[in-house]
Image: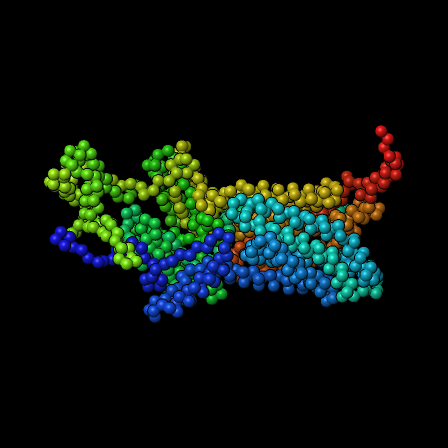
């Protein structure tokens, strides 16, 4: 007590957490790998409820943010879409068959196939998550296809006078090859999905496997359960109806005959359409996932280099007051802030929004409303952050890249110039290099020889500097179960002016105090807070927010164009964060498409034992993809993970419809029909099942497009590809496939001819080959 004042006190505040302006203590809970987010959330909520019962009345534990809310709401929306899709598909079947008995048969196949798929999900060790449920929604229109084809063919045999049992046997036998072919094709097309790069490939592999499980189970149900149900519950048609044609079938026959007589017309139109689709594909905006309403508006707020905790905290309070208006308007629940993250000049602040159905404004609307205010606050920069439903790291953080060079100073100057040029482009906002020689630093260079001559240890210098400038932790003491830090600081006002350091004195070994300047030189110079490297070169990271409606792919293209004009030849840029993942995705997209098409072609060639038949079916696929691309463009969509999956899925669906026609036409050729007569008869016979399966899949995806709520943007991206692509693709199947068959089938002999030659050679072959 003779030389110092000893007192109990509190440490200076270096972090803070507030909810609706009230101070609190924040605790972050991260789930372990392989654990379920929803299950963890439920456990935490139960623990919080139990804890609140034992706390004083003025203390309460609240859950400020919860990722499981978005997941739970998304799952609820997907389940609603699943139910709606099932009802729509059943209605489509009834409209075509016009018989409740006949409708019930494929309708029963839907829950049976879906339940079997759920069992397969369990056995495979997958979980019921957003992607597996989304796969079940898409499967609703697919699993009923095989049942529709079998049921329709059985009904066709009944209409020609066959009894229930005979119709079930003959109808199923006639269609079994087509069902197995479509099943193998659809199952095979999902294999390339697992080859998508990185985390998305791992996630969507579950999506692909679930759809593969679904179509495999549905084919088994269609070939076993459906004929049994047809015999059990079906009604035999006693009168002959085989010669009747509806107005629609007569129109189709006439138009198809016109095109078969003039094959150049559909071929030229299709090629023009495909070329248009190619250019539309090149112009599609790219992004990892669609911009989603995640139910919260969050931003990272960073102060200038050297900014104190108190300075940043004052700015955060200003932002909190602005966000509180969102709560007062009835759109938000609570305002949350965490200050002192990292080096002390970084904070996170945001507002948790009400449930999607309880507000009209979207997350993006609210961000647009408050962005001008938060970006106008001097001394800090605010960057909005929004995650994505796939949980991909770096998502929702705008454009991130780095300028690479050989010298930090020159590279930093180049990054500053590039950022200034980007800021003039309206698609970028808040462009900021994350590197500046702006962090103030005072260097004390000790003359070791002078210090040694005077007997001044280096520890004495560091202790003096720490104590006089602020305070330092000298020791720890234990009081009961508590650890108490002991801090030492100089009495009076701390040194807060660099020139005051010259007036400090240190004690020599002889007990004499000498000025610090006698053994050290004090220099003041700014430094960079961090030094980054990318690709073994010096790097200056740059971040930029994107204007409303701007896609990440467009932002990357614009940045590169500006960089090419402003950077020297020895400097370059490298993408980081979400932009880097997007680049990897773009590089592999065409490979995935090509791989999927090749697998389907090989599967078809093996099934039909003819590359000609496989080629006829596959030639319509590019036009279906072009139709899907145009649908994306017309709806203002983008090329993202969800739409890419839809395009791969469309390859299998297109091939499936073509199989129904080509397989039947080959049978008619085996029966002795000419090529033109065979394809015309096959097209007329398969018109109804093709339309039924296409419309059921088409309308089955409608709930994805019309849905709202959590995750609606991502579901719509997949839905529009299937809806728009399959709509036009069906037209190509019904008209272009017959024209292609007429042009190419003449180069392949009927299977019956080859079978006859084989039988003749076998009959003429000797009983045993003599040595």
Coordinates of residue 450 in the picture (x, y in percent) = 16, 33
Question: In the image, is 544 to the left or to the right of 503?
Answer: right
Residues 690 and 82: in front is 82
Coordinates of residue 567 in the picture (x, y in percent) = 40, 36
Residue shown at 34% from the left, 69% from the top: 56
Total number of numbered discs in the rendering: 0
Residues 346 and 127: in front is 127
Q: Quadrant of the C terminus?
A: top right
> Residue 570: which quarter of the image?
top left
Asked if residue 741 shows in the view, the reply is: yes
Residue 218 vertical position relative to residue 450 in the rendered view, above or below: below
Residue that protrudes farthest toward the top in the picture: 771
Coordinates of residue 549 in the picture (x, y in percent) = 47, 52
Residue shown at 77% from the left, 65% from the top: 232
Question: In the image, is 433 to the left or to the right of 474?
Answer: right
Coordinates of residue 453 in the picture (x, y in percent) = 15, 33
Residue that protrudes farthest toward the front in the picture: 480
Question: In the image, is 287 to the left or to the right of 185?
Answer: left
Residues 204 and 519: in front is 519
Asked if residue 632 shows in the view, the reply is: no
Residue shown at 59% from the left, 43% from the top: 592
Residue 542 vertical position relative to residue 389 in the rendered view, above or below: above
> Residue 326: which quarter of the image?
bottom left
Q: Quadrant of the N terminus?
A: bottom left
Residue shown at 52% from the left, 56% from the top: 713
* Picture colour scheme: rainbow
Question: In the image, is 3 to the left or to the right of 634?
Answer: left
């Amino acid at each position: 007590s003779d030389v110092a004042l000893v007192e109990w006190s509190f440490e200076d505040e270096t972090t803070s957490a507030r909810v609706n302006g009230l101070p609190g203590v924040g605790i972050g809970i991260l789930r372990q790998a392989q654990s379920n987010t929803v299950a963890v959330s439920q456990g935490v909520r139960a623990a919080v409820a139990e804890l609140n019962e034992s706390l004083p009345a003025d203390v309460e534990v609240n859950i400020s943010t919860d990722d499981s809310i978005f997941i739970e709401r998304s799952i609820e929306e997907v389940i609603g879409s699943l139910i709606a899709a099932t009802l729509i598909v059943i209605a489509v079947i009834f409209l075509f068959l016009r018989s409740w008995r006949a409708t019930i048969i494929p309708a029963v196949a839907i829950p049976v196939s879906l339940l079997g798929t759920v069992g397969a999900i369990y056995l495979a060790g997958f979980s019921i998550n957003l992607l597996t449920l989304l796969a079940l929604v898409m499967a609703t229109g697919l699993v009923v296809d095989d049942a529709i084809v079998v049921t329709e063919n059985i009904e066709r045999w009944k209409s020609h006078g066959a009894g229930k049992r005979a119709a079930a046997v003959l109808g199923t036998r006639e269609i079994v090859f087509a069902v197995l072919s479509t099943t193998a094709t659809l199952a095979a097309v999902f294999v390339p999905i697992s080859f998508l790069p990185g985390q998305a490939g791992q996630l969507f592999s579950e999506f692909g496997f679930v759809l593969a499980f679904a179509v495999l189970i549905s084919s088994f149900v269609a070939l076993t359960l459906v004929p049994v149900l047809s015999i059990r519950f079906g009604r035999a048609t006693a009168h002959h109806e085989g010669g009747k044609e509806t107005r629609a079938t007569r129109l189709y026959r006439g138009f198809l005959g016109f095109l078969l007589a003039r094959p150049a017309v559909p071929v030229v139109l299709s090629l023009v359409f495909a070329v248009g689709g190619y250019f539309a594909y090149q112009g599609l905006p790219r992004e990892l996932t669609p911009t989603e309403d995640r139910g919260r508006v969050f931003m990272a707020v960073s102060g200038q280099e050297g900014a104190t905790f108190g300075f940043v905290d004052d700015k955060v309070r200003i932002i909190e007051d602005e966000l509180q208006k969102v709560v007062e308007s009835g759109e938000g629940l609570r305002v949350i802030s965490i200050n002192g993250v990292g080096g002390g000049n970084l904070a996170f602040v945001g507002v948790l929004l009400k449930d999607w159905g309880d507000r009209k404004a979207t997350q993006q609307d609210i961000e647009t409303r408050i962005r001008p205010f938060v970006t106008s606050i001097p001394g800090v920069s605010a960057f909005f952050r929004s995650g994505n439903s796939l949980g991909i790291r770096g998502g929702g953080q705008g454009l991130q890249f780095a300028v690479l060079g050989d010298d930090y100073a020159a590279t930093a100057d180049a990054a500053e110039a590039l950022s200034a040029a980007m800021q003039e482009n309206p698609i970028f906002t808040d462009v900021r290099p994350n590197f500046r020689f702006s962090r103030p630093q005072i260097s004390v260079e000790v003359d070791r020889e002078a210090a040694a001559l005077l007997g001044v240890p280096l520890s004495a210098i560091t202790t003096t500097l720490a104590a006089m400038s602020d305070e330092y932790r000298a020791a720890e003491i234990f009081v009961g179960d508590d650890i108490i830090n002991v801090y030492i600081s100089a009495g009076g006002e701390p040194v807060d002016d660099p020139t005051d350091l010259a007036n400090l004195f240190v004690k020599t070994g002889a007990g004499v105090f000498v000025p610090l300047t006698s053994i050290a030189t004090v220099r003041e110079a700014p430094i960079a807070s961090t030094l980054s490297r990318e690709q073994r070169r010096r790097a200056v990271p740059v971040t930029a927010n994107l204007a409303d409606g701007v896609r990440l792919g467009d932002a990357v293209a614009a940045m590169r164009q500006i960089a090419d004009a402003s950077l020297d030849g020895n400097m370059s840029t490298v993408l980081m964060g979400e932009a880097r993942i997007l680049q990897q995705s773009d590089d592999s997209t065409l490979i995935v498409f090509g791989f999927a098409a090749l697998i389907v072609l090989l599967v078809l060639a093996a099934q039909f034992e003819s590359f000609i038949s496989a080629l006829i079916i596959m030639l319509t696929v590019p036009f279906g993809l072009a139709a899907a691309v145009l649908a994306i463009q017309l709806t203002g969509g983008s090329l993202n993970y969800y739409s890419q999956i839809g395009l791969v899925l469309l390859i299998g669906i297109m091939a499936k419809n073509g199989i129904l026609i080509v397989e039947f036409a080959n049978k008619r050729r085996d029966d002795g029909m000419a090529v033109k007569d065979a394809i015309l008869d096959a097209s007329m016979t398969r018109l109804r099942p093709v339309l039924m399966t296409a419309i059921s899949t088409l309308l089955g995806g409608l709930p994805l497009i019309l849905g709202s709520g959590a995750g609606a943007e991502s579901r719509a991206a997949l839905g529009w590809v299937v809806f728009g692509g399959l709509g036009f693709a069906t037209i190509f199947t019904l008209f272009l496939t017959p024209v292609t068959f007429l042009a190419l089938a003449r180069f392949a002999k009927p299977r019956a001819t080859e079978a006859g030659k084989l039988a003749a050679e076998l009959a003429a072959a000797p009983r045993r080959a003599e040595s």
